[in-house]
Image: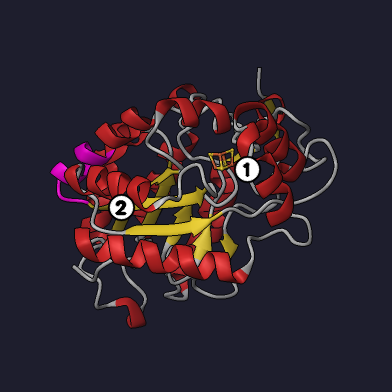
Amino acid sequence: MPRYITVTSLLNKTKKRDPWFLDDYTINPYSSCAFNCLYCYIRGSKYGINLAEKLSVKENAIPILRRQLAARAAKHQQGIVVLSSATDPYLPIEEKEMQTRQILELLLEYRFPVHIITKSPLVVRDLDLLHRINENAVLPPEMQLYAHKTFITFSFSTIDPVIGKQFEPGAPAPEERLRALQACANTGFMTGVSLMPLLPFITDRPEQLSRMYAAFKAHGARYVFPASLSLWGEKEADSKPLMLQAIAQYYPQYNTYYQQLFAQQCTVPAAYNDALQATAAHVAATYDLPARIPFK
Ligand code: SF4
């Protein structure tokens, strides 16, 4: 059973628009996340080892958000809202709670553009609302080159169902995400993929990237954001020990490499990342899948 909590704010203004996600604002309808990915950056002592056990519904979200959106809209401060940055907006609980759907209704009313980032096919339920947002939202002046006002990005670290289960134990299977991507693309949405984290040696080899980009292209993606792995913390609920345990369990042949990669820092070494980005850029050019959302 989820917990119900009250919050004082739902609409977060970002400091700087990210070149991938184009966020002016973020909204997280839930606290914590039932998909429970081992690599998730929200991990830490706040939620414990099983993120699903701390899942909470923000029960006063809608009246708070209405006030915040109305105030911004009155000052013509509509901007791109990312749903979501610290949970998934289409968790299984969303089927009953409909928090995300109610949030979309408010975004439509106050004419805010939206960027959905999800691992769930449940987003297809809301394509009616997303179409209306796409027609009626107001883009910030400097974003007028974009022909779309709704963007739908599916998040993957792999398209292999076995690897998916190992590192994203509560999330929908990659195949389900691919089918949802296709459904969104088929109805005319600007759709793409957030391909992160790519797991060193496990999912970031050139032939694996090529297979993934080919699948994304075949299912209607227009862009792919590739990024490597970052691991945080040393306590048992942090992403670093959880991921290193999983590597030792499922990929003992890479155990030493991982220990070395993350011995000194949270991110992979710069030389490793540069090589990965160069390979990804080459594959992206082959499939015409840029690492930025196209204007149209
Ligand atoms: S779906 Fe996203 S927010 Fe949820 S656990 Fe996975 S990485 Fe974290």
Q: Quadrant of ligand 1?
A: top right
- Specify whether 33 is left or right of 294: right
Query: Of helix, strand and loop, which one carries label 1?
Result: loop
- The residue identified by callout 1 is 39
Residue 186: within the magenta? yes
Specify the label residue 192 is tagged with.
2
| Picture quarter with the C terminus | bottom left
Instruction: Check residue 62 for magenta coloring.
Output: no
Residue at 49% x, 58% y: name it: 227
Q: Position of residue 257 (x, y in %)?
A: 66, 48
Point out the image quarter for the N terminus.
Answer: top right
Q: Position of residue 97 (x, y in %)?
A: 50, 27
Crowding at dot 1, Cα within 10 Å, few <14 / some 14-19 / many 20+, comes out as many
Q: Label 1 is placed on what type of residue?
A: Tyr
Secondary structure, mark 2, is: strand
Q: x and y percent of residue 289 in the render?
A: 25, 61
Magenta segment: 181-189
Relative to 52, 291 lies left or right? left
> Which residue appears at 60% of the width and 71% of the height?
270
Looking at the rendered structure, the kind of residue marked 2 is: Gly
Disc 2 within 8 angstroms of ligand 1 (CB): no
Q: Main secondary structure of the magenta part?
A: helix
Horizontal side, residue 112 vs residue 228: left or right:
left
